[in-house]
Image (cartoon, rainbow, N blue to C red):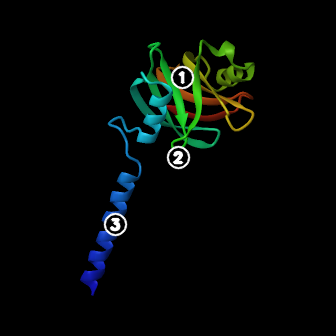
Amino acid sequence: MRQLITITLSSVLLSAIAFSVNAEPSTDAGIPEKVKADIIKRHPNAHDLQAGREVHFGHDLLEVTFKDDDKESRLELFRADGHLFTDELPLTGLGEAPPAVKDALDKAFPGYVLKKAELITNPNGPGEEYEVYLEVDGINWKVSVNEKGDIAGKDHF
């Protein structure tokens, strides 16, 4: 009886693992097929797809970076269900962000050097977040700041 229960539990666990692996088929780049198909449908010449995880507006999102015909990188954010959430738009500098964003960064990261900045607009209502890459004393930071200057998240790498 004990052996039968163990075999049954093992079978259930193996089935669960197989299901979770097959539940989200992905490309070699780790991008779910549904997301890749959506990108290719809208950008037929997309290539060099890469993905990573981010949090914006309280949502866990998949950020996909790719190149298109214009040879510039594009950034798109997708929900867990594979639907497009929004784009990330590159900024030429913090002059394109509200003054509260720069003020918050000046206060939290004195003496920083700006590496790049991106704008994420909330597709579900009002609000913007700025994803800012900084260097301070040889440490690289990725900081999310909303339009009011509230730091929503920060990571160093």
- Which callout, 1 or 3, points at the residue further toward the start of the chain? 3
- Which callout, 2 or 3, points at the residue further toward the start of the chain? 3
Question: Horizontally, is 16 left or right of 115 in the view?
Answer: left
Q: Residue at x 66, y 20 (%)?
A: 106
Q: How crowded is mark 3: few (under 14 residues within 10 Å), some or many (20 or more)?
A: few
Residue holding disc 3 = 13
Q: Residue at x 44, y 35 (%)?
A: 37
Marks 1/2: CA–CA distance? 28 Å
The x, y position of residue 49, in whole percent, is: 40, 28
Residue 131: which quarter of the image? top right
Residue holding disc 2 = 81
Q: How many labels does the image show?
A: 3
Question: Horizontally, is 127 left or right of 50 in the view?
Answer: right
Image quarter in which the N terminus is found? bottom left
Picture layout, residue 113 above or below residue 126: above
Q: Which amino acid, by three-letter code, is at mark 1?
A: Tyr
Q: Are marks 2 and 3 in contact (CB under 8 Å)?
A: no
The x, y position of residue 94, in whole percent, is: 65, 16
Question: Horizontally, is 120 left or right of 53 in the view?
Answer: right
- What element does badge 2 sit on? loop
Q: Nearer the viewer, mark 1 or mark 3?
A: 3
